[in-house]
Image: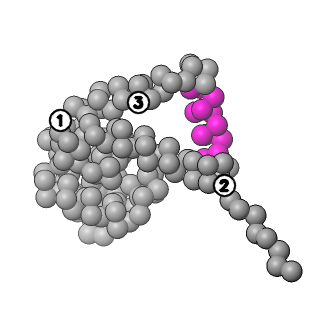
Amino acid sequence: MKKMVETLDLRQFFPYRLSVLQQLVSQAIAQHYHDRFDLSRIEWRVMATLAMFDGSSAKDICDFTQMAKMQVSRALARMKKNGLVVLHISNTDQRISRLSLTDEGRVIYRKIVPMVKTEEQKILAHLSASEQKQLLKILRKLEYALA
């Protein structure tokens, strides 16, 4: 007699639920920078990373954001073409290149931040202040455990 394999209920499976939540949150926030500034989610994450860590390399961005090298490379190529990012190559070692937002990139970033922070607050408003702190604590704990 064949043994039955237990059915996985995705509605109760943490990785699936987290993935769905991530997608919903990203879509809610992306509407603010995509429609107005024609930025993809990947481009926005690259922009936000460079605003935090000016002079990062593409590898640094990949490591920080956990995005694939190809995604970051495509985003950077489009952002360079659109005048949002500039590449600085080291005078002493041509293999070393650093990225920065251009003035235009910084202006757009400063316009987007209040919009996405407002959307974040709308989403988090469904949780009490205590639940918000607990959520951040749980996220940090899981990130640390998996790092």
Residue 64 lies within the magenta run: no
Whether residue 133 is situated above or below residue 12 in the rendered picture: above
Q: Residue at x 38, y 54 (%)?
A: 61
Whether residue 69 is situated above or below residue 135 in the rendered picture: below
Q: Magenta residues? A: 132-143
Closer to the camera: disc 1 or disc 3?
3
Q: Residue at x 55, y 47 (%)?
A: 18
Provide the secondary structure element on which disc 1 rests: helix
Provide the secondary structure element on which disc 2 rests: loop
x then y, percent, for residue 51: 31, 41
Marks 3 and 2 sit apart, C-alpha to C-alpha, by 29 Å
Q: Earlier in the sequence, mark 1 or mark 3?
A: 1
Marks 1 and 3 sit apart, C-alpha to C-alpha, by 21 Å
Residue 133 lies within the magenta run: yes
Report the residue marked by disc 2. Answer: 9
- Quadrant of residue 127 within the rendered picture: top right
- Kindly indicate whether the residue at mark 2 contacts the one at mark 3 (C-beta within 8 angstroms): no
Report the residue marked by disc 1. Answer: 107
- Quadrant of residue 87 within the rendered picture: bottom left
Residue type beneath disc 1: Val
Mostly what secondary structure, the magenta segment?
A: helix
Q: Which mark is residue 120?
A: 3
